[in-house]
Image: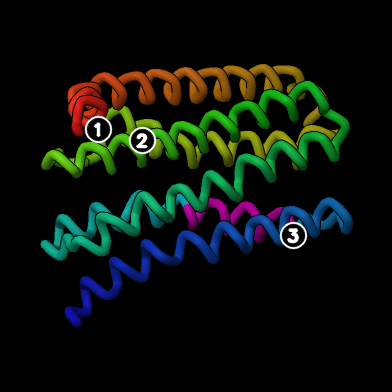
């Protein structure tokens, strides 16, 4: 196999072990507070996000875009959502922030439902030759999901530290703004995909 193609595919699949490492370290830090666990957890999430930023870019630059990469990349993104957002809801609840935890839980459910719905729409569209490529709004949503998750995690681990107290309420409200923006993007993206694939849904419903 082409070495560049192998590297790009490895970068894509690396997203999963990195975000699982974040999960293990973040949960461990809840039971054994340690700045080192926070550091390595944050680094794992950061590098997981970087894989999403660079795998597609390198594949296009090196002209090694492959069907496997096209299928694997969105799957790795979904693994990130399924692991990260419910875990953030649990971490918030563990820290005694039940209202914020509920917001994050709704956030996680909407994200997962949107991805299941879009996967269904693409499957229906494929019956009639639809391209199935990601729409720009979906790409924006995906790209922003990584820093959004990182921002919420930073709030979780720092908000109860003494040096953070003067800006705690501003950080909390910034989290709500970020989460509200992402929920809005998620809903608009769902609507955009539904509208784009509505003709295929109609054909499928009318098909005998």
Instruction: Identify which residue is drawn at 67% across, 56% down.
Output: 23
The residue beneath circle 2 is: 118
- Residue 114 belongs to magenta span: no
Above-or-below relation of 158 to 106 = below
Location of residue 180 by image quarter? top right
* Secondary-structure class at tag 1: loop
The residue beneath circle 3 is: 37
- Residue 66 left/right relative to 74: left
Q: How dense is the environment of label 2, judged by Cα within 10 Å: few (below 14), some, or many (20 and up)? A: many
- Main SS of residues in magenta: helix
Above-or-below relation of 6 to 64 = below
* Secondary-structure class at tag 2: helix
Q: How dense is the environment of label 1, judged by Cα within 10 Å: few (below 14), some, or many (20 and up)? A: few
Instruction: Identify which residue is drawn at 54% across, 66% down.
Output: 17
Instruction: Identify which residue is drawn at 58% across, 17% down.
Output: 177
- Magenta span of residues: 36-48
Location of residue 135 by image quarter? top left
**Which is more foreground, mark 3 or mark 2?**
2
Counting from the top left corner in percent of width and height, residue 39 is at 68, 56
Instruction: Identify which residue is drawn at 78% across, 31% down.
Output: 164
The answer to whether mark 3 and mark 1 are in CB contact below 8 A is no
Going from N to C along the chain, the mark reached first, 3 or 1, is: 3
The residue beneath circle 1 is: 135
**Which is more foreground, mark 1 or mark 2?**
2
- Residue 25 left/right relative to 50: right
Can residue 74 be seen here? The reply is yes
**Which is more foreground, mark 3 or mark 1?**
1
Location of the C terminus (image quadrant): top left
Residues under labels 3 and 1: Cα distance? 37 Å
């Amino acid at each position: 196999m082409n070495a560049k193609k192998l590297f790009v595919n490895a970068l894509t699949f690396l997203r999963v072990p990195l975000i699982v490492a974040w999960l293990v370290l973040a949960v461990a830090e809840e039971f054994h507070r340690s700045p080192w666990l926070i550091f390595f957890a944050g680094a794992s999430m950061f590098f997981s996000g970087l894989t999403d930023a660079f795998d597609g870019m390198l594949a296009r630059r090196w002209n090694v875009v492959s069907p496997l990469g096209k299928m694997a990349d969105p799957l790795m993104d979904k693994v990130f959502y399924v692991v990260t957002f419910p875990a953030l809801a649990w971490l918030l609840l563990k820290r005694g922030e039940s209202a914020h935890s509920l917001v994050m839980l709704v956030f996680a459910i909407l994200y997962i439902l949107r991805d299941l719905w879009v996967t269904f729409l693409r499957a229906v569209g494929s019956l009639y030759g639809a391209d199935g490529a990601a729409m720009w709004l979906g790409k924006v949503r995906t790209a922003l999901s990584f820093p959004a998750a990182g921002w919420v995690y930073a709030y979780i681990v720092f908000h109860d530290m003494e040096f953070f107290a003067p800006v705690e309420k501003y950080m909390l409200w910034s989290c709500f703004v970020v989460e509200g923006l992402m929920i809005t993007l998620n809903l608009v993206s769902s609507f955009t995909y539904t509208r784009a694939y509505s003709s295929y849904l109609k054909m499928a419903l009318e098909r005998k």
